[in-house]
Image (spheres, grey):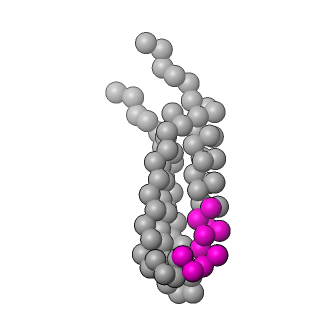
């Protein structure tokens, strides 16, 4: 059995003292990526440029993790 190594990351987006959203992703050694965004306090999240900017940075980091994994992936021979 071959294991698919992965990178897992989870981050809370905090405005003031409130967790307004959470973003998590898994980047797999094949370059596959799955991500989840949970907006906990919609009004505070959508009213905050800081929250939107942080989310953009987190998404960029997820894409980079996927690209990094893919760049070192060697497909198994059949």
Please indicate whether residue 58 sits to the left or right of residue 12 in the image: right
Q: Is residue 19 visible?
A: no
Q: Quadrant of the C terminus?
A: top left
| Residue 36 in which image quadrant | bottom left
Q: Quadrant of residue 73?
A: top right
Question: Which of the pair 64/45 is nearer the observer?
Answer: 45
Q: Position of residue 21 (x, y in %)?
A: 48, 72
Task: Report whether 62 appears left or right of 2.
Answer: right
**Is residue 33 positioned above or below 44 on the image?**
above
Q: In the rendered image of this protein, does residue 78 appear above or below residue 17?
A: above
Quadrant into which the N terminus falls: top left
Q: Check if residue 52 falls in the magenta segment.
A: yes
> In the rendered view, does 42 fall on the left or right side of 48?
left
Please state the horizontal and vertical placement of residue 77, each as a whole percent of the image. Answer: 48, 14
The residue lying at 58 percent from left, 56 percent from top is 59
Q: In the image, which residues are magenta?
A: 46-56
On the rendered structure, is 53 left or right of 31? right
């Amino acid at each position: 059995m071959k294991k698919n190594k992965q990178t897992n990351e989870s981050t809370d987006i905090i405005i003031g003292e409130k967790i307004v959203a959470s973003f998590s992703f898994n980047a797999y050694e094949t370059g596959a990526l799955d991500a989840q965004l949970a907006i906990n306090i919609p009004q505070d999240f959508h009213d905050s440029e800081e929250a939107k900017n942080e989310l953009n940075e987190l998404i960029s980091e997820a894409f980079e993790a996927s690209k990094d994994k893919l760049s070192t992936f060697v497909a198994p021979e059949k």
